[in-house]
Image (cartoon, grey):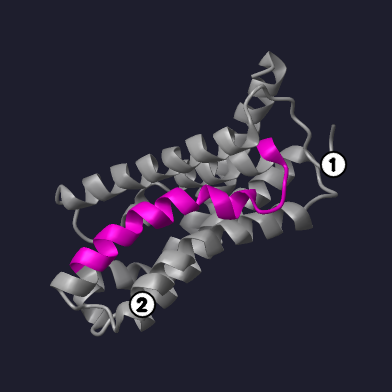
Amino acid sequence: MEGGEVMISTKWKPWAVILVWGLILVAVLMVGAVIELAGVSGTCMFVLVPAFAAMAATYPVIKVGRFGTGVLTYVPYAVIGFVPLLLFDWLQDHSLRGLWAVFVWTASSPLIGLCADLAFAAAGRLSNHARAMITGAAVEAATFVVMLLGMRYLYVDPTAADSHLRLFDTWYWFTLPWMVANGAFGGFAAHALAREAGARGT
């Protein structure tokens, strides 16, 4: 069906789709983090793998088709990410402005998922592939905003992470279009995967 709510048959329970793809999203971002830590200077995991991250975040939204799916998809990342934020950025380095900043950073991940939900709902009258692309683009646009605001206002010295921050506040003319375009591609890929899974009845 083109336009309206995406209805794709699935043998998977909605919670299973959300959990599995939430963990895939974690894995995607962790791969980006490993590449970053391996010595690729001047980059950020959110900029390295935006298409794959958008695909992982968008797939459950279009597969389940219920508002709130995007929020729940980011919960595994938020829960897992809470630990290093607390242990390293707060307790060890004291680089965050306060314990409250740990919780704000943690809450920002489901906020990205909420933007995916809102974009998916707002594009309800468009074709399914356009709706998925808009959702993927919204995921990456929201990621850009969250990263920019988080690094600027949650850290005692934002310049300590200058190699990351400059991607968002100086090179935004490249980073934002790059992330949004990759997000749209990731959304399209998610739609293709969901359609194929629907055709197979999985």
Is residue 65 located in the magenta-colored stretch of the structure?
yes
Residue 43 visible in the displayed image: no
Residue type at mark 1? Gly
Q: Give the magenta-colored segment's residue range.
A: 63-88
Q: Please tell me how crowded label 1 is: few (under 14), some (14-19), or many (20+) other residues with Cα within 10 Å.
A: some
| Image spot of residue 69 (x, y percent) | 63, 48
Give the residue displayed 28% in from the left and 59% down from the top: 83
| Image spot of residue 28 (x, y percent) | 38, 41
> In the drawing, does residue 28 fall left or right of residue 144?
left
Give the residue displayed 67% in from the left and 44% down from the top: 132
Query: Quarter of the image holding residue 160?
Result: bottom left
Residue 125 visible in the displayed image: yes
Q: Is residue 185 above or below residue 194?
A: below
| Image spot of residue 147 (x, y percent) | 41, 68
Residue type at mark 2? Ala
**185 or 8: nearer the viewer:** 8
> To which residue does mark 2 refer?
101
> In the drawing, does residue 188 fall left or right of residue 74?
right
Report the disc number at residue 173. Answer: none
Give the residue displayed 44% in from the left and 49% down from the top: 76
> To which residue does mark 1 refer?
3
